[in-house]
Amino acid sequence: SNDTDWYKFDSAEDQNLKIIFSHDGNGDETSKYWTVSVYESDGTTLITSENIYGQATETSIQENFKKGTYYIKVTNYPYYHLSDEYSLTVSDKVTETKLGDVDGDGLITSADALQVLQMVVGTTELNYTGDVDGDGQITSADALQILNYVVGNISSF
C-alpha cells in the first residue's frame, strides 16, 4: 500500500512561497515513486507534482499563495522503494521569475521553450513558470506560446 503523510501550513498573507521536497532516492528513472500535492483548505487541489523519481532528487514548487491554510500531501510507493525518508520545506525565500522564463536567466528565449519540452517528456523537473497558458499543466502548447513570444507573434502571455 501507499504511504501518505499530511502537513498543514498557514500563509499569513498573500505571498509567493516555495515548497522544496527531497529524498535519498533508490530505483530507476522510469517509474513514478513520489507525489507531492498542495490543497486549499476546502480540499481543492492547487498543485500536484508527479515527476519525482527514484533517483536522488530535489524538486521545488513555487506558487503564489493567498492568505489562508493549506495542506501538503506526500505519497510514496513503497513497493518500489528501499527508503521512505524525505525532507519537506516551505520557504518564503523565493526568487521572482517572469512567466515563461523557465531557466531563470531573466530572459524569455527559445531555450525556455526547449526546457518546457524537456519537462513534457520527463527529462527535466517541472517548473510552473513554463505554464504560460495558465491551464495548470506543462504541455507542448506552452512551448509553442513561448516561441511565439520570442519571434514577436504575441506580446504577452
Image (spheres, rainbow, N blue to C red):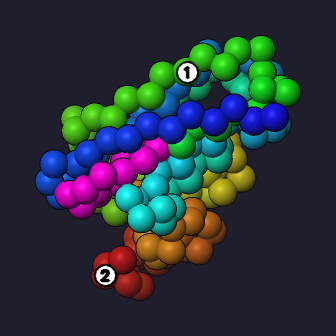
Say above or below: 62 vs 132: above
In this rendered view, identify the residue nearer to me: 87 or 115: 87
**Residue plotted at (60% across, 17% down):** 85
The quadrant the N terminus occupies is top right
**Residue plotted at (50% across, 74% down):** 135
The quadrant the C terminus occupies is bottom left
Is 67 a magenta residue?
yes
Position in image of residue 39 (x %, y %): 46, 55
Q: Is residue 4 left or right of residue 155?
A: right
- Check disc 2 and give the amino acid type: Ser
Location of mark 1 (residue): 86
- Check disc 1 and give the amino acid type: Tyr
Say above or below: 25 vs 108: above
Main secondary-structure element of the magenta-colored stretch: strand
**Residue plotted at (20% across, 57% down):** 67
Location of mark 2 (residue): 155
Q: Residue furthest front?
A: 42
**Residue plotted at (63% across, 36% down):** 4
| Secondary element at tag 1 | strand
Disc 1 packing (10 Å; few <14; some 14–19; many ≥20): some
In this rendered view, identify the residue nearer to me: 71 or 125: 71
Say above or below: 44 vs 9: below
**Which tag is nearer the camera, tag 1 or tag 2?**
1
Disc 2 packing (10 Å; few <14; some 14–19; many ≥20): few
Position in image of residue 115 (x %, y %): 54, 51
Label at residue 55 = none
- If you read the primary sequence from the N terminus, does the residue marked by circle 1 or circle 2 appear first? 1
Magenta span? 61-72
| Image quadrant where residue 139 sits | bottom right
Q: CA distance from mark 1 to mark 2?
A: 42 Å
Q: Is residue 147 visible?
A: no
Q: Is residue 108 left or right of residue 74?
A: left
